[in-house]
Image: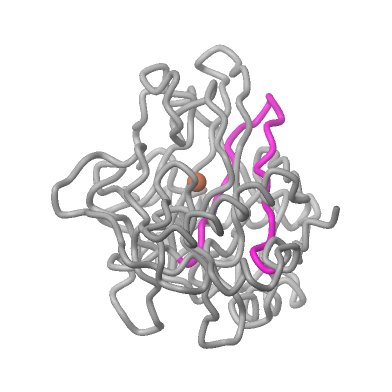
Amino acid sequence: MTDGIRLSEFRLDDGTRDLLGKEIAERVAATELDSDADEAILATIGAHALGNLLPGQVLHELEIFSVAGAHALILGNLPRQDFPDTPVHGYGDETGLAVINALHFGLLQLLGATPFAVSYENDGRLIRNVVPNPAASGITSSWGADSEFFWHSDQPHLPFGEPGTDPRLYVPHYLSFYAVRNDERVPTELTAVDGVAEALDEHTRTLLQRPEFAVGVPASNDMDGSVRELAPARLLETAPDGRLRARYDRGTTRGVTEEGATALAAFSESLTGAGSRELVLNAGDFMIFDNTRVLHRRKAFSPLPDAGARWLRRIYAS
Ligand SMILES: [Fe+2]
């Protein structure tokens, strides 16, 4: 079955990668830059170097990504640096990662996206270390490994935002990742919302677009009394650009009417057999996908010993 994913994919040649790494390393070596306090400076350094050195076609694709309708974009073979052990307990020294942070924030700037954090997750920090945290064993969390994620969108209990608003109040439009290491070769799986919807019958599709659902806070979020469930909510809706978008997390979404519950069950059932694109990020790869038009999941995996365990860096952006 087709996954319906439209992916823009590019890979830097080694020469460009090395020049880019050298230029950014020189600029950040003269200073100390934290990924929260100095985000704007890191973005400026990264975007400047990327603007100078990326091929014109790649720059163009980054510029048009948010309007062109691709579901995801991968830019492979970016510079790496000397990496410390994987911070399996969640946080590590950010100033030592200034080269890759400049790249990540710089790419988001070129994509026209604003990075942000939500206060009730990840200690309010911009960059989430997606690592197999032993404390998250058995929990479905980006800090887990042994639990499988079912298809979902991130922060589905928030309303959809419009351009020119505070992104922290709304569903993250994009999830972006830089892969530090993924020697386990664990894929991130994507499936397109429009493809899933097309496979449903007309009646179910119509019901899913009615406000007959309640969507709660996923269990992986740190609890906070100010964050509640969104209800009544539509599971599917047409965005202002005419494209279909979804909010969904099987564990926290329920129908508030009998018809809604039936439609939700059909949607979940249809996802079980949905086609998916398995994207394995290698060290130095960047990926961004549209969290409103794509559902994602990750299967359970066995991490390597802590120091070399899978380590992705995730930033929300809108
Ligand atoms: Fe997720």
Is residue 201 covered in magenta?
no
Q: Position of residue 180 (x, y in %)?
A: 58, 37
**Of the pair 115 and 103, the residue shown nearer to us:** 115
What residue is shown at x 57% (from left), y 20% (from top)?
308
Q: Residue at x 53, y 65 (%)?
A: 246
* Location of residue 233 with respect to 21 vertically, above or below: below
Question: Is residue 151 in view from this perspective?
Answer: yes
Residue shown at 71% from the left, 30% from the top: 185
Task: Name the residue furthest top.
Answer: 305
Residue 228 x/y as whole percent: 23, 54
Q: Which residues are magenta?
A: 173-194
- Asked if one can make out residue 33 in the rendered structure from this viewpoint, the answer is no
From this view, report whether residue 65 is shown above or below residue 164: above
> Number of numbered discs present?
0
**Relative to residue 213, is residue 178 depicted above or below?**
above
Residue situated in front as seen by the camera: 151 or 168: 151
In depth, the one of 6 and 213 nearer the eye is: 213
Instruction: Name the colour scheme.
Output: one colour
Pick whichever, 228 or 91, lies toward us.
228
